[in-house]
């Protein structure tokens, strides 16, 4: 028994201290903030003045070092890796291409904690378009850490404040979303699975679930990306808009109560929390269900 115990301790010690030992760092370069985990570049938070909205790109996996999300293509040029936006807001479009239709503009992202076991970024963004009152201002807090060598974690907390009365017509383009890299998509042999074990677009589309995970196997190994919704969120658990080509988004505005619109009053504040897990292995090996149970308590 002693020999077995001695063999287990170093392994347990390694994993339990990894998050404390690894250095996560952030640096601002122009209109983006780059985040590195150990020696590996993880992601950039991009808030360029000529972009539709701030977004994260790339999100590199812990196994391959390559992106688990993709940035736009000829068919869906409005899919920008990992992003937050919405269409049909008081007649404006804060999701699809075309800056004159509406934009979400960063008022100044800043690094609050730049080096250590985590980094913290804060940003304030105004939703605006020409010749119209700004409907929303949002305040974001982004926390990035690495719980283990095979798991990178990005927490995206946002508070949306209604500057005027806001009506969001029924739309499939709303709030937090990820465009999964084609390598990991169901169309190319990957797996999309939710908390209830439902798989693929056919089973997950429109299903209300706390989380969805997408993963696939590359030459370097298996890795994926999961989005978790915090139970404190308004509309929790939101139904998901999913596509087998590689798109996931908890999208409450596509299933409003009256099947027509979501109405929010001036001064109303909506707080939303999401956790993104970029992981090695499949859903089970990455412990997504267990990670969600932990997230619920935070």
Image: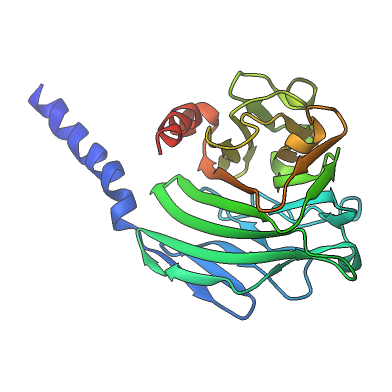
Res 137 visible: yes
From the viewer's perspective, is residue 177 above or below residue 235? Answer: below
Q: Quadrant of residue 109?
A: bottom right
Q: Find residue 277 and report its horizontal and vertical position in percent.
A: 53, 43
- The answer to whether 277 is drawn above or below residue 108 in the figure is above
Asked whether residue 61 is in view, the answer is no
Quarter of the picture holding the N terminus: top left
Q: Specify the color scheme.
A: rainbow
Expressed as whole percent of the image width and height from the top left, the position of residue 101 reads 90, 62
Q: Is 120 on the left-hand or right-hand side of 225?
A: left
Name the residue at 87% across, 67% down: 99
In the image shown, does 216 or 202 lie closer to the viewer? 202
Question: Which residue is at a point 48% across and 32% down the rendered structure image?
Answer: 292
Give the x, y percent position of residue 91: 90, 53
293 relative to 126 in the view: left or right: left
Front one among 133 and 71: 133
Who's the residue at 71% across and 39% down the image? 249
Q: For this rendering, which residue is in front, 46 or 146? A: 46
Quadrant in which residue 216 is drawn:
top right
């Amino acid at each position: 028994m002693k020999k077995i115990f001695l063999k287990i301790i170093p392994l347990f010690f390694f994993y339990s201290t990894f998050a404390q030992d690894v250095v996560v760092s952030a640096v601002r370069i122009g209109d983006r903030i780059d985040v590195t985990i150990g020696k590996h570049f993880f992601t950039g938070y991009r808030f360029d003045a000529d972009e539709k909205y701030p977004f994260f790109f790339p999100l590199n996996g812990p196994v391959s070092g390559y992106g688990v999300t993709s940035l736009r293509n000829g068919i869906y040029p409005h899919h920008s890796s990992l992003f937050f936006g919405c269409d049909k807001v008081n007649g404006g479009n804060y999701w699809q291409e075309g800056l004159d239709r509406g934009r979400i503009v960063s008022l100044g992202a800043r690094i609050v904690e730049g080096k250590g076991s985590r980094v913290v970024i804060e940003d304030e963004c105004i939703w605006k378009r020409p010749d119209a009152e700004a409907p929303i201002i949002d305040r974001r807090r982004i926390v990035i850490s690495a719980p283990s060598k095979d798991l990178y974690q990005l927490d995206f907390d946002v508070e949306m404040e209604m500057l005027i009365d806001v009506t969001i017509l029924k739309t499939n383009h709303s709030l937090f979303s990820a465009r999964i890299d084609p390598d990991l998509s169901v169309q190319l042999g990957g797996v999309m699975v939710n908390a209830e074990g439902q798989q693929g677009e056919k089973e997950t589309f429109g299903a209300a679930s706390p989380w969805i995970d997408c993963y696939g196997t590359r030459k370097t190994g298996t890795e994926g990306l999961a989005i978790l919704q915090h139970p404190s969120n308004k509309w929790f658990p939101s139904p998901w808009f999913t596509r087998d080509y590689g798109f996931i988004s908890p999208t409450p505005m596509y299933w409003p109560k009256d099947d027509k619109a979501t109405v929010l009053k001036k001064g109303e504040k909506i707080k939303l929390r999401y956790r993104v897990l970029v992981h090695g292995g499949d859903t089970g090996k990455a412990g997504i269900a267990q990670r969600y149970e932990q997230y619920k308590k935070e």
